[in-house]
Amino acid sequence: MRSINSIKDLSLQEIDALVQTAEDIIARPEHYAHKMAGKKLATLFYEPSTRTRLSFEAAMIELGGHVIGFSEAQSSSAAKGESIADTVKTISCYADIIAMRHPKEGAPLVASLNAGVPVINSGDGGHNHPTQTLADLLTIHREKGTFQNLRVGVCGDLKFGRTVHSLVDAMSRYDGVSFVMISPEELKVPSYAKLPLKERGIPYTQTTDLEGAMPELDILYMTRVQRERFFNEDDYVRLKDSYILTPQKLIHAKKDLIIMHPLPRVNEISVAIDEDPRACYFKQVLYGKYMRMALMLMLLEVK
């Protein structure tokens, strides 16, 4: 039995295999329609979610399986003080696999150490979000045709942005990749998230200037400033509008740039960008479903 807590839990070969499985699901959905017949997914979401939770549920249903779970902590026995360990031991009696989101870093790891079924980390605080990264990788693969020799710009809340931390780790494994990290000084990428770059000798620069970095980028990955991660409302208000992507700021961008965002957005990407063919964030939403289908098939060893 195997769980996924971080993108580091997947080898490069496994990531490539998941991408190929997702591509096959897109090409032959009917072939996968009953692969999970008789299987149940439990979605344990202690924190609000639209895309990740519904994507997991749609993924299992489209594979022919069923879904149980809860969408907020208050609707579970966590409201009565039940521990994560006891919860997942209970849920393991009912489900074949668990997708878990929790506001505390490390909570899904605790769950995986106590569950009797595989656990997929679906976001733990500002730490990791491996299935969002898988969605991002499939988007890059389908839009760019490669993971190599790309200049990746990540912009916004890079301190608490778990999707950024996971994406940087994943993309740094490929040849010729480099990064531009664009953020206010207060929201720079933490040291631990830059360790994979330093260990692998991956070039990166840090800047506060989005427009100055724009001409060199192959990928622009925007993120929102996350209100729920701030302890001080004044700090959030001061930083929340640090970067707002508008058509004017894309004047000097490459014609084949792809614009990504893990969503939800607030106002950091103007709705005027939505019609730009370089906007890929709603494609990411769809591709996330296919990658979650592929991941569950892998973890449950369904051929």
Image (cartoon, rainbow, N blue to C red):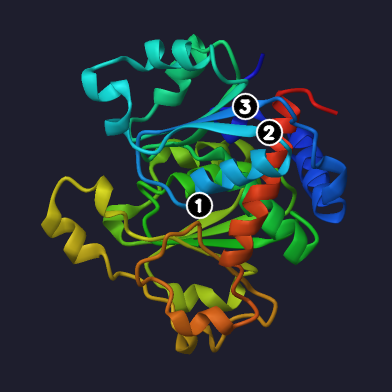
For the point 48% across and 10% down, the residue is 114
* Distance between mark 3 and mark 2 Cα atoms: 6 Å
Quadrant of the rendered structure where residue 119 is?
A: top right
Sequence-wise, the earlier of marks 1 and 2 is 1
Residue 96 against residue 233 in the figure, above or below: above
Q: Nearer the viewer, residue 39 or 119?
A: 39
Residue 163 against residue 17 in the figure, above or below: below
Q: Which residue is mark 3?
A: 40
Location of residue 125 in the rendering, given as x and y in whole percent from the top left corner = 36, 37
Q: Which residue is mark 2?
A: 65
Mark 3 in CB contact with mark 2 (< 8 angstroms): yes
Of badges 1 and 2, nearer the viewer stands 2
Q: Is residue 172 visible?
A: no
Q: Regarding mark 2 in the picture, which secondary structure is present there? A: loop
Location of residue 38 in the rendering, given as x and y in whole percent from the top left corner = 71, 25
Mark 1 in CB contact with mark 2 (< 8 angstroms): no
Q: Is residue 81 visible?
A: yes
Numbered tag placed on residue 51 in the rendering: 1
Q: Nearer the viewer, residue 46 or 148?
A: 46
* Distance between mark 1 and mark 2 Cα atoms: 19 Å
* Distance between mark 1 and mark 3 Cα atoms: 19 Å
Sequence-wise, the earlier of marks 3 and 2 is 3
Location of residue 251 in the rendering, given as x and y in whole percent from the top left corner = 54, 89
Q: Regarding mark 3 in the picture, which secondary structure is present there? A: strand
Q: Tag 1: residue type?
A: Arg
Q: Tag 3: residue type?
A: Lys
Label 3: few (<14), some or many (≥20) within 10 Å?
Answer: many
Sequence-wise, the earlier of marks 1 and 3 is 3
For the point 57% across and 41% down, the residue is 57
Q: Tag 2: residue type?
A: Gly
Label 2: few (<14), some or many (≥20) within 10 Å?
Answer: some
